Image: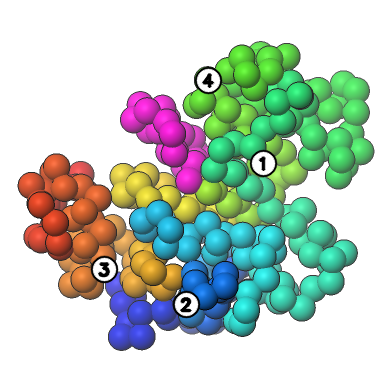
Amino acid sequence: MTERPDRGATERPDRDTAAEPVIEVRDLWKSFGDQEVLRGVNLFVLDGETLVVLGPSGCGKSVLLKHVIGLMKPDRGSIVVEGRELTKLDAHELKDLRMRFGMVFQGAALFDSMTVGENVGLPLKEHRGMKGDELADLTETKLRMVGLAGVSHLRPSEISGGMKKRVALARAIALDPDIILYDEPTTGLDPIMAEQINELIRTLQRKVNATSIVVTHDLHSAKFTGDKIALMHNGRIELVGTMDDLRHSDNEAVRTFIARGHAPALGSKGGAGPIDPEVFE
């Protein structure tokens, strides 16, 4: 388990290990006015690994994700992706690096004026110049990968919320990215559909072998999708480790998040009481 007194730091993997960090975040700070949202975040994501950033709403998870893809610039700190420091890239270099990312936005972010197939094929059309049968065939291939064969002609308004999430996943993998970012992929879904999306994320990870970051407040989703979990609280990383590390953690922020998030199972009326093992089943 990685749990340190300064709370905001995590151990950097030894350079002799087989897997190398694809994403390195060092001492990242970001404020909006007087509000400090990121307060010295440190994270490392290894090649082919799925890291879950877990924490309550408003703790800075999505802001961190937007920094990793270069949509925001930090007040200070370093973000290195595949050996390149994002804060030092010009607009052209940053655009080139983003082509190596796929992102699933919280609300799916599909274009209502386009069909499902046009939404998925948009990156292929815009960035690879595909058209005609070649574009249609590859679009259908990506949709089949997420279990949505034969729906290319439908509009987003004609499909369910869970299907929209799947379309967003298909679009995210359209360019065969090295890195996939998921912003609250199960938010707004019923438990059965959320479970299907969790399974799909894990299945896609095995198929495409991308390095992934999943942002969520859902402990069950974190357990199912993550190789490693970073618990975030008030703009800091409190713990990085496995679900078993969370189970046995004495960190007050970790225990409070678990207790408050699962009060019915715990019988808790507030505070950080003992952690019920059933929460992790």
- Local packing at callout 4 (Cα closer than 10 Å; few below 14, some 14-19, many 20+) is few
Which circle, 1 or 3, is nearer the viewer? 3
Tell me what residue is drawn at x 23 percent, y 72 percent: 251
Q: Position of residue 14 (x, y in %)?
A: 48, 81
Gap in Å between the C-alphas at discs 3 and 2?
A: 15 Å
- Residue kind at label 2, given as amino acid type: Arg
Q: Is residue 126 left or right of residue 156?
A: right
- Local packing at callout 1 (Cα closer than 10 Å; few below 14, some 14-19, many 20+) is many
* Residue occupied by mark 3: 253
Q: Secondary structure at mark 4?
A: loop
Is residue 192 among what the camera can see?
yes
Q: Position of residue 181 (x, y in %)?
A: 58, 52
Question: Which residues make up the magenta segment?
Answer: 184-204
Earlier-in-chain disc, 1 versus 3: 1
Q: Which mark is residue 160?
A: 4
Gap in Å between the C-alphas at discs 1 and 2?
A: 32 Å
* Residue occupied by mark 1: 173
Q: Is residue 25 left or right of residue 219?
A: right
Examine the rendered structure and indicate whether residue 217 appears above or below residue 152: below
Tell me what residue is drawn at x 30 percent, y 72 percent: 1
Q: Which mark is residue 267?
A: none
Q: Secondary structure at mark 3?
A: helix
Earlier-in-chain disc, 2 versus 4: 2
Q: Is residue 101 left or right of residue 46?
A: right
- Residue kind at label 1, given as amino acid type: Ile
Q: Please identify the quadrant where the C terminus is shown.
A: top left
Tell me what residue is drawn at x 61 percent, y 60 percent: 66
Which circle, 4 or 1, is nearer the viewer? 4
